Image (cartoon, helix red, strand yellow):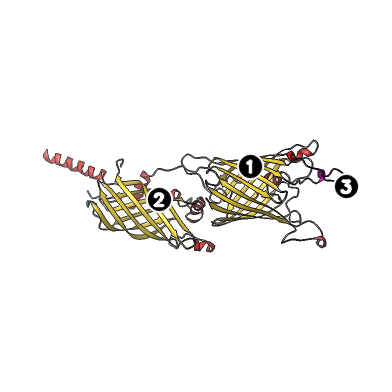
Amino acid sequence: MIQVIHAQDILKDLEAITVEDSLPTIATFKGTHISIGHSVETRKKGVLEISSMNRFWNRPVPDTERVQTFAADKWNSRVGVDYGISDRFTVGAGYGTGYRSIDVFGKYRLFYQRDSGAKFPFSITLFQGGVYRGKSSFKGILYTDEAMTTKRDVPSENKFATTTQLLIARKFSRNFSFQIAPTYVFRAEDKLVDDASPHHFAVGFGARYKVSNHVSIVSEYYYVLKPVDFVDTYGPFSLGANWEVSNLLLQFKLTNARNLVEDKYIIKTENNFNFRDGNLHFGFHATYFIQL
Amino acid sequence: MNKLLLLFFTIYGVGLVHAQDQYITRQGEVTFFSYTSVENIQATNNQVASILYPSSNKIGVQILMRAFTFEKSLMYEHFNESYIESDLYPKATFQGVIVDFDPTQEGTQTRIIKGDFKLRGITKPVEFKAMIVKSDNIYSISGALDVSIKDYEIKVPPILSPNIAKNVQVSFKFQYAPNDNQK
């Protein structure tokens, strides 16, 4: 008659009345960028992020000729804002000092990885970016004559580039996430060169390994399947650390990519990754989170 | 024959009592507050499951950590990823006894609840005051307790320790109805 309820029975009873939800896996990557490139992560509705992206490097010139500004010979930066229109859709815009570039992008989360309930193994995000560069980066064809004295005008229609990416990522464990990014780049600038194709393809690989609750090691590499026809390029590589401090995400990296907008660093990184001056770039991104 | 009938009704009666023995809620509300001079953090979970056993004065609570909602989405991510580690410890549970509880008393009674609270895999004894209201076969229990983040080994980096309170105030509100689907 007297009912004895054991601790285990209470847990069992609680389990019986609980309905398991299929929750999306969170924090596959910490920021909207893994290291140099975009991650599958979108920002939640009403979130505004302000980011500053920088690269510092030295020029490969003899020490006597070196004119060093603060900490490094050269500096390239982009300041940007990202805004979450909905939980799945994030838009952003930025200004780059290097080529006076204005870039905009949209990112839509197609699928969330789900590890419980109705399972889905991957997170998939579609990325579309476009950029207009006020200043052309073309060295050889910028000039109309051999002596490189008269600069030619680059028509506005050749100053555009677009990048389309399908970002596919999986959080394999709480510490390890991996991303593959098939990428298509259209660079109108390349049409300035006779017989050169403006269409380019690449595949990006990115990974993060969480070393503590607030710090992770990240790496990224883009394998360029169809590079530009007229200069030698290398796949951009990056090795870095991400550190989260409350509303601030700090991303440090060593990379050979000095540019900050997708089409250019993926397709037109003209130096390989090594520790020589001109090739090794120190990168620093700071992203500040504001909930509107 | 009469005796047999009596026995039958006794068993049936016991059965009835048994069916009425579990009072449950699936929409219990648990809120926590972390007040510091730097930052106030508040989160609410209103999908908390709880069972009340009036016949034995026992109570059980199960909290899914992922179901807490925050004002800032970044806080939600940090809470689950860096502090509570909800991928490793998806649930917090409480099992306890309401001391001197009279389940038949209509109206309000204030009682002490004693039990074990398990958070991040660590079980600690807790004791707190709760207000219990019974009306129309519905029990409402509400109260608050302080949880020391140190007790449950929630690690806060030194640079962020001014942002997060040492003692987090947890309040709860449950409304129990008889469990009709009880096995």
Q: Secondary structure at mark 2?
A: strand
A193 displayed left or right of B29: right
N-terminal of the pair, mark 1 or mark 3, is 3
Quickly name the residue at label 2.
Answer: B63
Q: Chain of mark 3?
A: A
Quickly name the residue at label 3.
Answer: A147
Q: Secondary structure at mark 3?
A: loop
- Residue B32: x percent and y percent? 41, 55
Q: CA separation, marks 2 and 1?
A: 37 Å
Quickly name the residue at label 1.
Answer: A181
Viewer can see residue A116 = yes
* Kind of residue sitting beneath label 2: Ile
A115 displayed left or right of A189: left
Residue B68: in magenta span: no
A251 displayed left or right of B158: right
* Magenta span: A139-145
Viewer can see residue A9 = no
